[in-house]
Image: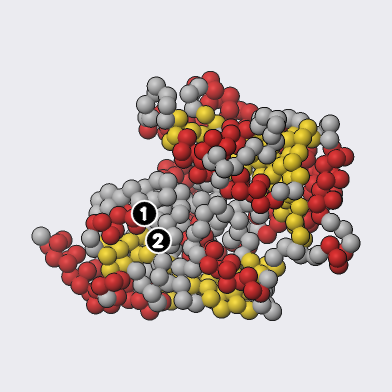
Amino acid sequence: MEEQKRQAALIIELQELLGKQGVLIDASDCAAYSKGARYGDGVSLAVVRPNSHEQVVGIVRICVAYQQPLIVQGANTGLVAASTPDRSGRFLILSLERLKSHIQIDPINRSVEVDAGVSLHELNEALLPYGLFFPIDLAANPSIGGMIAANTGGAKLIKYGDVRQNVLGLRVVLMEPAGEILDLQTALRKNNTGPDLKQLFVGSSGAYGIITRAVLQVHYLPKQTATALVVPRDQAAVLELLQVLERDCSEFLSAFEGISGGALQAVLRQFPSISNPFFPEDCPNYCVLVELSSGITVTHVGFDLQDILNACLERLFGDVVQNAVLGRGAELWHIRHSISEALRHEGRIIAFDVAMPRSSLVAFRADALACIAKDYPWIEARDFGHWADGGFHFNLVWPHLVTQAYDIQTVQAIRSTIYDLVVLRYQGCFSAEHGVGPYNLEFYQRYTSILAQHLAGTLQHSLDPSRLLGLTWFGRELS
């Protein structure tokens, strides 16, 4: 009864701060916020939706006073359950979807100050008239705050870097002191006046504070691009092709995306409007989507990137390259961005977002495929990924139409096998760009050193001593 009284008083204070439109309490209204994009299907106490920084501050102060745990949520596109509550019903969801009124562009500094609730698409629409864009290339449309909390990478990382490399400044609301604003907003690219504190919050999965505004470095839109979907001689030839492109096309290389035949076939099965780019030939066992880009027009420099890419591939034909579809950039990128959605229709996804040294990718893929074929022959590999930066989505599908019923114990055994390969044999990591959330927290605890966990937990305890913010706890006690 005392808990019900506490919750009722909490809701009244939140409604007084935000108005009834800003506080959702009906289960039907909260349901969409409580279910994750792939994992996480919880129950929330309520959903609060501030539309100003001052309201975020007020929410934090109320929650700390009532010792009310909360989950921060952006566009809810994350894949590790870091932005959704558990089934207890005790968490309040703090949705930043309405915190999006501020986009201030400085074209001379090539930077933008933006509220955390602004989506990637909304930001790029605002930047378009200036010939600028935020170059994190994703199939989803996350919020800026969520991208920073997860340190999103994307398909163009090899040229532009990840979110961390493009964050200049942040504004963060702290849990301790309750509701205090840590103003790290700056548009400086060079600042050695002390530790770079903003980086504490980038990639922290929202566990250290609530990001409400960011200053981002943005880039000029390419004025010409060149595209090819390349069939390599074999798996080893993928890395041979990458080395040649980096050597001969150097700063123009903007994407190098591996696509397995299984992933390509899934797209063609699930989306009949997408045609086989290699028709009349069958889909290859493996292909690589290559893109070159430049901010200089053909008229200014006298060369065409598509001609350069075509000539490079022609020199490799018959040795490193067996086949290629040239040009048709929009069509080929549409295929690449349709993979994740296609796999969802094929069955239950067992997703792996891993990274390792590029030199290990071929051996890892062979070992991982052999493990699956030997012990789990009904599981289908549908892998793809950012080979140029060592990122690899070794995604598996448990098909709907198999006799073996989906079994969580089997899935966990597969995860342990694959992650042991990645981390212990190939010196990689279990989360390349999705961050750490409840879904993979056990693997953080398994593979991260005790000393590193202790340090991360010490920071978290200093910033949130009551552990009210989120479900992810990075700490471990030293023995």
Q: The residue under label 2 is which amino acid type?
A: Gln
What residue is shown with label 2? Answer: 73
In percent of width and height, residue 174 lies at: 41, 70
Residue 179 seen from this side: no
**In the rendered image, the vertical position of residue 447 relative to residue 10, given as above or below:** above
What residue is shown with label 1? Answer: 84
**In the rendered image, the vertical position of residue 248 relative to residue 121, given as above or below:** above
Depth check, front residue: 269 or 92:
269
In percent of width and height, residue 261 lies at: 62, 33
| Picture residue at 83% right of the left edge, 32% below the top | 319
**In the rendered image, the vertical position of residue 471 relative to residue 209, given as above or below:** above
Q: Which corner quadrant of the image does residue 411 belong to?
A: top left
| Labels 1 & 2 near each other (Cβ < 8 A) | yes
Q: The residue under label 1 is which amino acid type?
A: Thr
Sort mark 2 into few (<14), some (14-19) or many (20+) by Cα contacts within 10 Å.
many
| Picture residue at 35% right of the left edge, 60% below the top | 71
Q: Secondary structure at mark 1?
A: loop
